Image: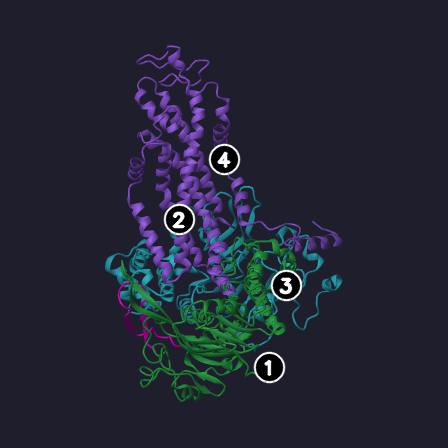
Chain colours: A green, B cyan, C purple
Amino acid sequence: MSDKDILVEVRDLKVHFPIKRGVLFDRVVGHVKAVDGVDLSIPRGKTYGLVGESGCGKSTLGRALLQLNPPTSGEVSFDGVELTTLPAGKLRSMRRRMQMIFQDPMSSLDPRQNVESILTEGLQTHGIGTDRTDRRRIIGETLDAVGLPRWALSRYPHEFSGGQRQRIGIARALVLGPELIVADEPVSALDVSIQAQVVNLLDELQDSLGLTYLVIAHDLAVVRHISDTVGVMYLGALVEEAPSDRLYTEPLHPYTRALMSAVPVPDPDVEDNRERILLAGDLPSPANPPSGCRFHTRCPWAQPTRCKDERPVLREIGASRVACHWAEQIATGELRPHQVSVEIVRPEGEGESPGVVSAPSEPGSYV
Amino acid sequence: MALLEVDDLSVTFARRGQRAVHAVDGVSFSVDAGQVVGLVGESGCGKSVTSLAIMGLLPKQPGLRVGGKAVFDGTDLLQLDDRSRRDIRGRDIAMIFQDPLSSLNPVIPIGLQVTEVLTRHRGMKGDAAAKEAASLLDRVGIPDPKRRLKEYPHQLSGGMRQRALIAMAVACQPRLLIADEPTTALDVTIQAQILELLKGLVRDSGTALLMITHDLGVVAGMCDTVNVLYGGRVVETARRRPLFREPRHPYTVGLLGSVPRLDAGRGEKLNPIPGSVRDLLPWPDGCAFAPRCARRIDDCVGQPPELVHTYDGRSYRCVNPEPVPGTVPAPREEESA
Amino acid sequence: MTLSPGKKREKIDRLSELAARDDERGVSLWQEAFRRLRGNPAAIVGAIILALFVLVAVVGPFLVPYAPTDTIGIREGLIKPGVIPGVNGDHWFGYDHQGRDEFSRMIVGARQTLLVGVVSTLIGLAIGALIGGVSGAAAGLGGRWGRWIDTTLMRFIDMLLAMPSLLLAVSIAALLGASLTTVMIAVGVVSVPVFARLLRGSMISQANSDYVLAATSLGVKKSKIALTHVVPNSLAPVIVQATLTLATAIIEAAALSFLGLGNPDTAVPEWGVMLADAQQYLGIRPSLAIYPAVAIIITALGFTLLGEAMREALDPKLRK
């Protein structure tokens, strides 16, 4: 298989959620642009990591890709089949080939199903396995693959620890023999020592089964660890996409740099000596995103021209794709970071339209 | 003399018809003035219960037993009556919690909640209190503080709420600040802001900080001394650099091997700890970590491991610790091999 | 405490295999809830009361010393205007106003009372669960059409809810004429909105859970998801409510009988009717009112105790 063998291709995907108000009749007063024009492609057998902070639309993107949230517009093609226009019945049988792993292993397992019933459900739906014994054989092999004992079959989710529950969730996805697995925050609900077990398991499964992953996480270190390519999202759009190692050594987008410098590393020597780019303020509301480059309100490199009024598109620089007008100048050091005034965007749902309040930032907010 | 000296703290929950749960079992550590001390561990290791017990905030229920001592500036906090404990709380010791939204009263404006602290502990009233509240919000980096004072918690973002909570906590210039997972609910860029703020507060005001977290990265960047907890016990205590450079307890070693590091390359295997936190050994039967431990020897079971103090001021509870590179392993390991 | 190395090794092995009890089958949530229920003294008391009540209702009528319709007192000339004789050795609760044996009537009345409670609750549960289930499935899993169905059904429920329950019952009784069936229907209909709203709300919250999304991503059909995942997980509060409704249904049925909307043939004893009859003779023999009243209260208490204990046992928040 060559790198050119693309399994998933997403083109200009948009997911907008209407904001409704009204007593008797719902009136659409605006849209939350959770995903606003994303292009990406995932080669077969590789891992694409999607990283970003809460509210950046990464989970919505993952669900829209699997058609669990209907996309507003755009195309998703899976192994050459266009999913957005696929009839419901065909889509259901297509689901055997693309599965999902959820963040919270407790809430994503039906508490009243035992493990055998959880794993059988998908098999029955897709008519895999000839009879009960055949299904039990398939289930047994899957349990071995995810490292769960056979006696787990008759047990219920609440009888397992968090890590084991996540293994059940992985087994449920795996039992159908899928090609693509979308993992939405697969380890963030787990304890540190268990996280590593699950990360390693995902790695091993990819090696032995040739799986393609879309891993969605807020933890840059986890994403970088298991991904071949990493896409960084900010307010519904990709701001940078690069091979995992390159993203770390040569982050091009200012947001990537800030994100990178904010992740704590468990090493005092690194922590004491690193340059920290502290972003001012909070994420703007996706219902009312800033004009132009969406990051310009918090960007320490923002320039008076272009950034405010021209939305940058992803362009290729070396092996990376980056959506920044000034990426080259920032990389060479021609542009220096400056202080940013803090802008506060009100959260949704307080009756008045989101307004912006500016104030000078406290000294030292940019170190 | 340390500012806070916790000695042999134990918390037991006994339930009708069930075996008593030793949530915290003989925890001892100390916090010096102006120092940042970390309590690190995974869920269920007893780190939060420890802090709640010190503050007297454990929900009163039959079957709750708190033992040991927690001496703050000469007074044992565990022996105080509710009234004097409340006086100390907020004035001398303040606490910041993980979830800022549930720690703030949703129907009272931020300003009133801050001035309330000022009125109660510093006797400030009216305009003076309002002015001080505004300057506090300003100090924790909340822009346009005068306006913010009139707003309700839900009108602030998560990061701003945590800042407001920190403002309330530092309102009386406490000598000890206890932060229980203060950034766990926040995004990384916001986390960086809040950690920087806490660091600044400690540096400028000389407040001691007890940092409770599961994140070794946070610890590496902030703490002077680190206590690693497992199964309700402190298993290793060391200063920051030695702990990360040469962890001695196998659990600490395992934790450090489990964390995916941003500066490690793609595909570098992690070394997880096998099993789960549930596989606990009751302490009197031996080391709680023994069922998951790669360096387990026969001596791990039978009696609780003693606290070993080393010459360089570290301590750990392990009969077969990770050898320090370049030294000859102790003979007792050879015996068991 | 020192152990020999062999013993220690044994101990480690035993402890590390602590989790691996492969001979034991898993414990489902229902089983676990039942275990918790068994450990709750309130549930035990409630269950004992109800068991006695059901036992009396089922076998009581075969064992009573006198026929409940036999007007012994009149035959023997004991009942005179303004006189109802009290307790004696043969008649443990005395006579009622027509000289019938009060004890026998209480025993036989238990059956009618149980019937009224169970049937009316079942009527409410069946209609309510049907409306709530359809509404909940439509709102939680259906698209635009689903929301429309849900809105229509819920407005209907709101209308039921807007009417005072007693008024609703009285109008139904007025419509169908006074009989025991009327009472059961009336009491049942009154409890429809509670069941419908409860099941609908519970289903909608379950429909938004991750495991439903997981089932969707497996490719399971929506109708199957509703039946195999959403409904079973939404039933707990409905079951609790049904138990509690049994208690109120008995009281409400008694109230309707008291208002004269119940069975006009007062020969068939029922606690509510007996209570209604007794009011005319409160001045002469108040005990005639006290017996059925106390019986109703104790039975309702039994259902309430059991219902509250079940609520506690099924509460997911209390699960460890």
Within the image, what quadrant is residue A351 found in? bottom left
Q: CA distance from mark 2 to mark 1?
A: 54 Å
* Residue assigned mark 2: C198
- Residue B201 lies, with reference to residue C238, above or below; the image says below
Write the start and end of the magenta stretch as one range: A340-367
At a point 32% along the width and 59% down the height, the residue shown is: B114
Most distant residue in the left direction:
B127
User: Marks 1 and 4: same chain?
Assistant: no
- Residue B21 lies, with reference to residue A248, above or below; the image says above
Q: Which mark is residue C47?
A: 4
- Give the chain of mark 4: C
Within the image, what quadrant is residue B244 found in? bottom right
Q: Amino acid at mark 2?
A: Leu
* In the image, residue A355 lies in the stretch drawn in magenta: yes
Q: CA distance from mark 2 to mark 4?
A: 24 Å
Mark 3, Cα crowd under 10 Å, few <14 / some 14-19 / many 20+, is some
User: Marks 3 and 2: same chain?
Assistant: no
* Residue assigned mark 1: A1
Q: Where's residue B68, x and y in %?
A: 53, 50
Marks 2 and 1 in Cβ contact (< 8 Å): no
| Residue C200 visible from this viewpoint | yes
Q: Where's residue B324, x and y in %?
A: 65, 70
